[in-house]
Amino acid sequence: MVNMDGNTKVKIIVKVYKGKKETIKMEWATIKDANEILQLYTRVVEHVNTTNIKLGWNVDVYPNDEFIKTAISNKQMCIIREDNVIAAAAVVNHNVNDEYNDIDWVVKAPASKIATIHALAVSPDLRGTKTSYTMLSDIEAYCKQNGDLAIHLDVIDTNIPAYKLYIRNGYTEVACIKMFYEVVGTREFWMMEHVL
């Protein structure tokens, strides 16, 4: 396995959850997966635009082809396949907006020890399945093996389903702040933390 910093690591085969061993399904995307990942994000954006969530995502801007290919080339784009089709995607790295430095996180450590999840998306066809849980759980297992102490992330304030997903999976809301992202402008975001 190649980690998010490009170093080779031993591949995780199992994780332990509630005393049971489970196989890790997450894998790192390759350039040949880029088009399929873009198609996944396109389906997610089309679905979300029919709801009240209003992420502000637009695959012409974010998460677009350049974003995906850059994440793949940096070994930061992880995916899960269901029946040989990419069912979920996310970027895992140590890159954050400056506003993250102003948050009173439980775990205060160098950026190299705090992972961040960006652009987590699960196929709309798989809503209500364990796919989003599996993706998060696999990311957490990877980050823990990689020596990260916590995961910090932000959730746009209209994305209640994502907020609930993180809360159900042991993440804590640390703050709610205004933050700027080019694709959505200045909006409110929940700042979430999961201590590993």
Image: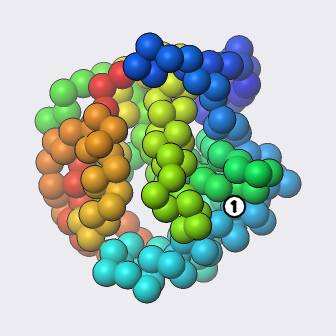
User: Which quadrant of the rendered structure holds the N terminus?
Assistant: top right
Q: Residue at x 63, y 29 (%)?
A: 24
Is residue 139 visible in the rendered structure shown here?
no
Q: Residue at x 60, y 53 (%)?
A: 88
The answer to whether residue 46 is left or right of residue 27 is left
Measured as percent of width and height from the top left, residue 12 is found at: 65, 19
Q: Secondary structure at mark 1?
A: helix
Crowd around label 1: few <14 · some 14–19 · many ≥20 (10 Å): many
**Camera-nearest residue between 19 and 161:** 19
Q: Which residue is mark 1?
A: 37
Measured as percent of width and height from the top left, residue 184 is found at: 37, 75
Measured as percent of width and height from the top left, residue 78 is found at: 63, 43
Is residue 175 visible in the rendered structure shown here?
yes
- Residue located farthest toward the right when viewing the structure as drawn: 32
Q: Residue at x 69, y 37 (%)?
A: 27
Question: What is the basis of the colouring in this image?
Answer: rainbow
The answer to whether residue 134 is left or right of residue 33 is left
Report the label total.
1
User: Which quadrant of the rendered structure holds the C terminus?
Assistant: top left
**Camera-nearest residue between 33 and 16:** 16
The answer to whether residue 37 is left or right of residue 48 is right
Above or below, 15 relative to 132:
above
Q: Residue at x 15, y 55 (%)?
A: 176
Above or below, 141 relative to 94:
above
Q: Image quarter for residue 23?
A: top right
- Residue located farthest toward the bottom when viewing the structure as drawn: 50
Measured as percent of width and height from the top left, residue 92 is found at: 53, 41
**Camera-nearest residue between 161 and 41:** 161
Above or below, 163 relative to 7:
below
The answer to whether residue 81 is left or right of residue 59 is right
Say which amino acid is labelled 1: Ile
